[in-house]
Amino acid sequence: MQTSALPDLAHTDAKPVHWLATATAMAAVVAAAGLLQPEAATATASASEHHVTAPHSGVPAAAAPDPAGVTFPLDCGAAGRTVADSAHGDLDGDGGPETVAVVRCAAGSGTPPSGIYVVTQQSGAAPRVVATLVDPAQKLNVTDFTVRDGKISATLLGYSSADVPRCCPDELENAAWQWKGNAFIKTVGPAGSTAQGV
């Protein structure tokens, strides 16, 4: 039998008492971790929940109106309407969110003209349209739509005449709306832009 060159290690010859002591110590560590874990998780969840539901005043934040069930002032006949895009934000500074929706008739092909509508909802009431920023009767298409810092921005694509094919808008307008006093005021980007190649 060959002897080991390593020193004799006492703990390599473990007796049942050693295993029992190790198991008891491990059980104590696991139990302590189990007792501390739920309290820490609860504190974290409470802080996170408070931040989401009541970021400033302790009053739960209102949800933005859902445009899905709104009746928009857009006559599409049997085709129906589709909400092409939507975003929300506090547009009038009252602390409650409004929703801005880009809506058009549902079409099997092509891109029908769009409207941009502001939707609000009083507590307990159904959401409703309170402003029309772009009327589909203007025959414009809406792209690059955003709502940020109380400002609504969009690129409006249009046609200089009835002779321009509906596939190829030749006018472009960068527009923005912001609530001032008691109305949405529209501002327009640089004039004379064209949409060819868009």
Image (tube, rainbow, N blue to C red):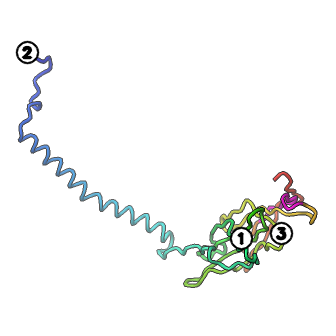
Q: Residues within 10 Å of mark 2 (few under 14, many from 20)?
A: few
- Residue at 76% x, 78% y is 75
Tell me, yes or no, whether the highlighted magenta stretch contains residue 171: yes
- x and y, in percent, of residue 93 in the image: 64, 74
Furthest residue to the top?
Answer: 2
Q: Quadrant of residue 118?
A: bottom right
Tell me, yes or no, whether the highlighted magenta stretch contains residue 8: no
Q: Which residue is mark 2?
A: 1
Whichever of callouts 2 and 3 sits on the residue coming sooner in the sequence is: 2
Q: Quadrant of residue 111?
A: bottom right
- Residue at 11% x, 30% y is 12
Give the camera-side residue of 135 and 97: 135
Q: CA distance from mark 1 to mark 2?
A: 89 Å
Q: Residues within 10 Å of mark 1 (few under 14, many from 20)?
A: many
Whichever of callouts 1 and 2 sits on the residue coming sooner in the sequence is: 2
Q: Amino acid at mark 1?
A: Val
Q: Residues within 10 Å of mark 3 (few under 14, many from 20)?
A: some
Furthest residue to the bottom?
Answer: 125
Left or right placement of residue 88 versus residue 54 in this view: right
- The magenta stretch is 165-175
Label 3 with label 1: CB-CB less than 8 Å = no
In the picture, the disc for residue 167 is none
